[in-house]
Image (tube, rainbow, N blue to C red):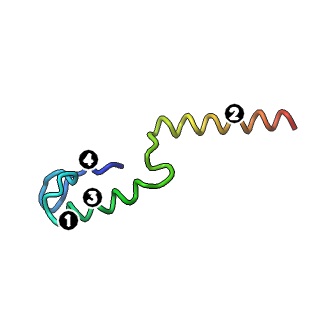
Amino acid sequence: MTYDRLVCANCAAPVSEGRCPVCRASRERLQHQEGGIFGQLTPAALAVLLVALVALAVLLHQAA
């Protein structure tokens, strides 16, 4: 999930604006979590990747 759609429970402002210390801390934490290998992939891209892996597994199984 991205922080641009989250609303802070402390100040009721979007977390992406960072108006209060709670927003800024949450925004910083979420930015560090998004840096993973799959953090920048959309759900559609993950679905395509999964279909490609399944197709590859089927091809390898038929070749063996």
Q: Which residue is mark 3?
A: 27
Foreground disc of the pair 2, 3: 3
Per the image, the residue denoted by label 4 is 4
Please tell me whether mark 4 sits on a helix, a strand or a loop.
helix
Q: Secondary structure at mark 2?
A: helix
Dot 1 alpha-carbon crowd within 10 angstroms: few under 14, some 14 to 19, many 20 or more: some
Name the residue carrying label 1. 22
> Which comes sooner in the sequence, label 4 or label 1?
4
Q: Quadrant of the C terminus?
A: top right
- Circle 2: is it few (<14), some (14-19), or many (20+) Cα within 10 Å? few
How many numbered marks are there?
4
Residue at position x 79%, y 37% from top? 60
Front residue (pair 30, 47): 30
What's the CA distance linking mark 2 and mark 3? 38 Å
Residues tagged 4 and 1 counted as in contact (Cβ below 8 A) = no
Cα separation between marks 4 and 2: 35 Å
State the CA–CA distance, disc 1 to disc 2: 45 Å
Q: Amino acid at mark 2?
A: Ala
Q: Amino acid at mark 4?
A: Asp
Q: Which residue is mark 2?
A: 55
Which is closer to the viewer, label 4 or label 2?
Answer: 4
Q: Quadrant of residue 49?
A: top right
Taking 44 as reference, is 19 left or right?
Answer: left
Marked residue nearer the N-terminal end (3 or 4): 4
